[in-house]
């Protein structure tokens, strides 16, 4: 990289991380149950989130995003299909069950180790469809271009998008282009929407998580967020960290071939694994316990996060999924994931419990526990 910035250690903005010490906040073990946290006195120390204007955190996939959807968008739009608030909506049309999703991509820089905004635009939407169990089929694509951007750069983005679509087995069938005045954009923004067919017998949604479910993750976490940050800020690490950007449709098919009775799938993009687990716990009214020693955090990501004061649980991924699987199917599903190229690093990271409903708790490597909150802002802005 042409420019190098020396990164200095910083205190974590979000408590914890792999092998993090217990913060003590709301984690006093109950008498006779040293591994069980006592949440009776837990209170959130953050100020009330009263924002008369939009801030960057509203796009971070955490608590502020959820509030914006709950208090602004959902009341305005309404409708039962929207109420599920899953990665994609499942609708019925002409007797067919379709998954339908849309996403907008504003990442900076446009190209980064392991991918580009074109790859994200395809894989992000394809993966949202796959998290409903759908077989992705068609995409739309909208380009918002800033006046003055080089045509050759737009062509590179379009070529990357087309190549990613072919790899994912989907077809771009319609689109739109708009141009905004110089200084009113950031080169290239993209929007993609996608549709796919949901097989009979598949019912994947956050509300289906239940106590006893085993929580799986499909591989190493935190790669995408750190890869984008390193290129954006000119940071150099001992080993180049590349984004995990990939289409997950084939992996999901392999998992569903074991059993169609998977309960929940979610791709942990903005807000990372922490946000995904928190949203599922809240939607289903269950507790989730995560074992930090079991989290597959690559050493370069762990080192980068320690240096920059980040928690890998909150760092974005673009080619991973989190699965809530009935315990009786967990071993077979995990074996099927290991047999797929995008699931070789899959691991069991925790389970659903009836305790502390709506809350995610991490058991640390030191034997303590900590609450894994939904992020309020965002550790890494503009990562997708």
Image: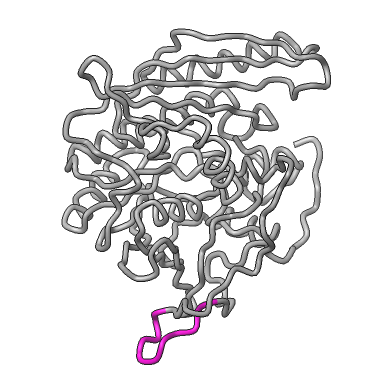
Camera-nearest residue between 233 and 380 = 380
Picture residue at 50% right of the left edge, 79% below the top? 27
| Residue 223 seen by the camera | no
Relative horizontal placement of residue 229, taking residue 21 as reference (left or right): right
Picture residue at 65% right of the left edge, 22% below the top? 189
Q: In this view, does 45 lie above or below 159?
A: below
| Residue 225 seen by the camera | yes
Residue 210, quarter of the rendered image: bottom left
Range of residues picked out in magenta: 26-36
Picture residue at 48% right of the left edge, 26% below the top? 102
Q: Residue 23, how many percent across, how many down?
A: 59, 76
Relative horizontal placement of residue 14, taking residue 362 as reference (left or right): right
Camera-nearest residue between 83 and 36 = 83
Q: Residue 241, how many percent across, how many down?
A: 59, 44
Residue 381, quarter of the rendered image: top right
Q: How is the image coloured?
A: one colour
Picture residue at 39% right of the left edge, 23% below the top? 168
Quarter the N terminus occupies: top right
Q: Residue 211, how many percent across, how many down?
A: 27, 62
Quarter the C terminus occupies: top right
Camera-nearest residue between 288 and 79 = 79
Q: How many labels does the image show?
A: 0
């Amino acid at each position: 990289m042409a420019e190098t910035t020396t990164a200095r250690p910083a205190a974590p903005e979000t408590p914890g991380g792999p092998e993090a010490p217990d913060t003590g906040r709301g984690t006093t073990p109950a008498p006779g149950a040293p591994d069980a946290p006592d949440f009776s006195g837990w209170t959130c120390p953050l100020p009330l989130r009263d924002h008369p204007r939009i801030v960057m955190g509203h796009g971070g996939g955490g608590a502020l995003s959820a509030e914006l959807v709950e208090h602004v968008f959902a009341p305005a739009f309404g409708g039962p299909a929207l109420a599920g608030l899953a990665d994609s909506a499942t609708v019925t049309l002409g007797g067919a069950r379709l998954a339908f999703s849309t996403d907008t991509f504003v990442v900076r820089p446009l190209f980064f180790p392991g991918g580009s905004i074109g790859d994200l635009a395809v894989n992000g939407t394809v993966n949202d469809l796959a998290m409903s169990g759908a077989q992705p089929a068609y995409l739309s694509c909208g380009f918002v271009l800033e006046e003055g951007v080089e045509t050759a750069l737009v062509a590179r983005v379009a070529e990357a998008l087309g190549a990613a679509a072919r790899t994912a087995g989907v077809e771009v069938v319609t689109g739109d282009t708009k141009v905004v005045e110089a200084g009113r954009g950031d080169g290239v923004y993209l929007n993609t929407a996608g549709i796919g067919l949901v097989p009979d017998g598949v019912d994947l949604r956050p509300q289906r998580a239940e106590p006893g479910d085993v929580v799986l993750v499909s591989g190493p976490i935190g790669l995408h967020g750190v890869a984008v940050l390193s290129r954006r800020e000119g940071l150099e690490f001992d080993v180049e960290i590349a984004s995990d950007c990939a289409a997950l449709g084939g992996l999901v098919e392999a998992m569903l071939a074991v059993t169609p009775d998977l309960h929940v799938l979610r791709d942990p993009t903005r807000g990372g694994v922490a946000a995904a687990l928190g949203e599922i716990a809240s939607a289903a009214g269950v507790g989730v316990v995560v074992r930090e020693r079991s989290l597959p955090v690559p050493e370069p990501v762990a080192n980068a996060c320690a240096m920059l004061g980040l928690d890998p649980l909150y760092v974005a991924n673009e080619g991973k999924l989190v699965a809530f699987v009935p315990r009786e199917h967990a071993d077979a599903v995990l074996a099927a994931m290991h047999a797929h190229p995008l699931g070789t690093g899959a691991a069991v990271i925790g389970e659903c419990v009836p305790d502390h409903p709506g809350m995610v708790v991490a058991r640390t490597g030191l034997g303590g526990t900590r609450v894994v909150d939904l992020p309020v802002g965002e550790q890494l802005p503009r990562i997708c």
